[in-house]
Amino acid sequence: MNETIARIIVVDDEPDLRDTIAEYLRRHGYTVDTASGGQELDTRLEEGPADLLILDVTMPEEDGFSIARRMRARGGMRIVMLTAANDSIDRVVGLELGADDYIGKPFDLREVRARIQGLLRRAAPAGTVPPPPPRAGVSFGGAVLDLETRRLSRPDGTEVPLTTAEFDLLAVFAANPNRILTRERLANLTNATEANAFDRAIDVRIARVRRKIAGAADEPDTVRTVRGVGYMFVPPPR
């Protein structure tokens, strides 16, 4: 994907803020639409798909968390949430709902653009994660990750939805089997932001992928916690 022609929708109930973000991104080559809330966003999406959404958390009628939940169920879009600068609870909730990134207010527009570029590049073939192992399918206990199609499926063929951040995390583990990876290393390999100051972001993503790859109760964990250090992917026996 060429990130400069991606379609972005800015969803915020503050007209000045959303118009400022939209105008800045348009000047840098993006196709940008705006919406004042969830209902108007639905209308914009009926006009055509979006590659990325910028969602404010605090909005009347339907808040950003509710919108993020609905949009993640649709799939196919990256989600960046705008939160209060010091509100870690909002950030954790947003990540748990499947947001790919968050930006604290007040923010520099250059930071917004940099975050967007990072997310869109990660969707391109030349991503920032290490190259995957030669085989396309990697077993994570109760599920198999297809690195070519970016799909996670259970033995019965049921597909398990993945966010971009979750796929990146699993792809890193697949490329580094039986190797201890610190939170900082995982943050660097998955292009996560502010992970040094916010290790909980990695922990939240680990918890999400564990739930998605969980199999039978007696199966050993394939993504294991190394206490005081980080995490390690231990492939199940063939």
Image: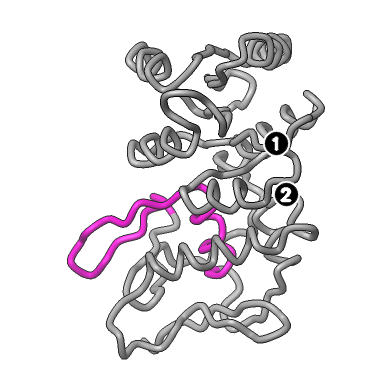
Which region shows up in magenta?
148-174
Q: Amino acid at mark 1?
A: Arg
Q: Position of residue 192 (x, y in %)?
A: 68, 52
Q: Image quadrant of residue 187?
A: bottom right
Residue 199 in which image quadrant: bottom right
Q: Earlier in the sequence, mark 2 or mark 1?
A: 1
Q: Position of residue 185 (x, y in %)?
A: 73, 66
Which numbered tag is attached to residue 193?
Answer: 2
Q: Residue furthest front?
A: 60
Q: Position of residue 3 (x, y in %)?
A: 62, 26
Looking at the rendered structure, which numbered label has been put on residue 17?
Answer: none
Q: In the image shown, does 104 or 189 lie closer to the viewer?
A: 104
Q: Is residue 81 above or below residue 95?
A: above
Residue 124 in which image quadrant: top right
Q: Which residue is mark 1?
A: 115
Label 2 to label 1: alpha-carbon separation: 8 Å
Are circles 2 and 1 on residues that touch, CB within 8 Å? yes
> For the residue labelled by badge 1, is the local secondary structure a helix, a strand or a loop?
helix
Residue lying at 60% horizontally and 59% vertically, measured from the top left: 131
19 to the left or right of 34: right
Q: Amino acid at mark 2?
A: Thr
Q: Is residue 157 magenta?
A: yes
Residue visible at 18% across and 66% down in the picture:
156
In this rendered view, identify the residue nearer to me: 169 or 61.
61
